[in-house]
Image (tube, helix red, strand yellow):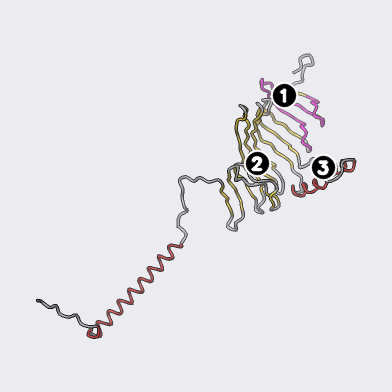
């Protein structure tokens, strides 16, 4: 039977060899600690590249600034936001599928919404891209509407009063509380004049295709009344019309022969 030589005991290892072994052990511990630290920091680092998706299915996306302020909401009908004015929601949620824009104060200032379906064989549809005046409603709107067998589409430019819409609505609520009669009628007139004569403002220009199938440029006064209209009707006839403040055509080019009215 062969006997292997007994390994030397710890106290038998010469001093220099033991010193080398301790240095190697310390070096191993230092390197291991450094590697562990690097791996730990790497696990909590933000990825160098943004996360990429080939496809994503969601009901709502909120785009926010670094401070959490909402700037854009993309949502389906059920998750769509209500109107925010003065930091307060003034309409119910859930009726505007599309995109809603928000200004630096967090108030709504425009959006893109759309809808479309058939009801009893009749089309009901629409699309709307708009931009709001600060603290007010839309002043630029690109709109398509269809219903009851008719449709129109075009660009509308609107005036809005300098007062904020929240202040206008608050004053309207006070007038609505009054009892019917001359005092309430007078309050309504004063409320309208306070805004410049047109409650909540008025459309000033429309260019597009109207429900009568005419390509139209319609210029309006400060109260929203048509005063100059250029049109090419569905039969290809062109005309220019000048209207008074009651909506009657005062002059027309070409003039209409009274014997053959159009």
Q: Residue at x 76, y 26 (%)?
A: 241
Q: Nearer the viewer, mark 1 or mark 3?
A: 3
Nearest the viewer among 80 and 215 is 80
Q: Nearer the viewer, residue 127 or 97?
A: 97
Q: Which residue is found at the position 78% from the left and 38% from the top? A: 222
Q: Quadrant of the image for the C terminus?
A: top right
The CA distance from mark 1 to mark 2 is: 30 Å
Residue 256 appears at what percent x and percent y?
77, 19
Magenta stretch, residue numbers? 223-251
Q: Are marks 1 and 3 in contact (CB under 8 Å)?
A: no
Q: Secondary structure at mark 2?
A: strand
The residue that disc 2 covers is 130
Q: Quadrant of the N terminus?
A: bottom left
Which residue is disc 3 drawn over?
Answer: 192
Name the spot of residue 115 as percent of width and height, x first.
61, 36
Residue found at x 73% / y 29%:
229
State whether residue 223 is above or below residue 35.
above
- Which residue is tagged 1? 239
**SS for dot 3:** helix
Callout 1–callout 2 Cβ contact below 8 Å: no
């Amino acid at each position: 039977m062969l006997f292997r030589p007994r390994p030397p005991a710890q106290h038998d290892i010469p001093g220099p060899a033991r010193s080398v072994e301790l240095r190697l052990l310390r070096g191993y511990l230092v390197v291991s600690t450094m590697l562990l630290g690097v791996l730990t920091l790497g696990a909590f680092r933000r990825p160098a590249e943004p996360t990429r998706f080939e496809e994503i299915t969601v009901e709502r996306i909120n785009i926010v600034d670094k401070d959490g302020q909402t700037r854009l909401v993309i949502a389906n009908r059920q998750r769509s936001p209500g109107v925010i004015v003065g930091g307060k929601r003034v309409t119910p949620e859930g009726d505007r599928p599309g995109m809603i824009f928000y200004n630096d104060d967090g108030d709504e200032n425009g959006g893109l919404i759309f809808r479309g379906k058939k009801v009893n064989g009749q089309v009901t549809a629409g699309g709307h891209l708009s931009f709001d005046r600060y603290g007010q409603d839309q002043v630029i709107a690109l709109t398509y509407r269809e219903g009851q067998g008719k449709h129109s589409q075009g660009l509308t430019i609107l005036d809005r009063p300098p007062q904020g819409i929240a202040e206008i609505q608050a004053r309207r609520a006070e007038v609505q509380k009054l009892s019917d009669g001359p005092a309430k009628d007078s309050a309504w007139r004063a409320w309208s004049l306070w805004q410049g004569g047109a409650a909540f403002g008025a459309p000033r220009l429309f260019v597009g295709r109207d429900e009568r199938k005419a390509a139209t440029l319609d210029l309006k006064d400060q109260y929203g009344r048509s005063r100059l209209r250029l049109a090419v009707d569905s039969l290809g006839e062109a005309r220019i019309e000048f209207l008074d403040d009651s909506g009657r055509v005062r002059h027309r080019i070409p003039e209409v022969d009274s014997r053959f009215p159009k």
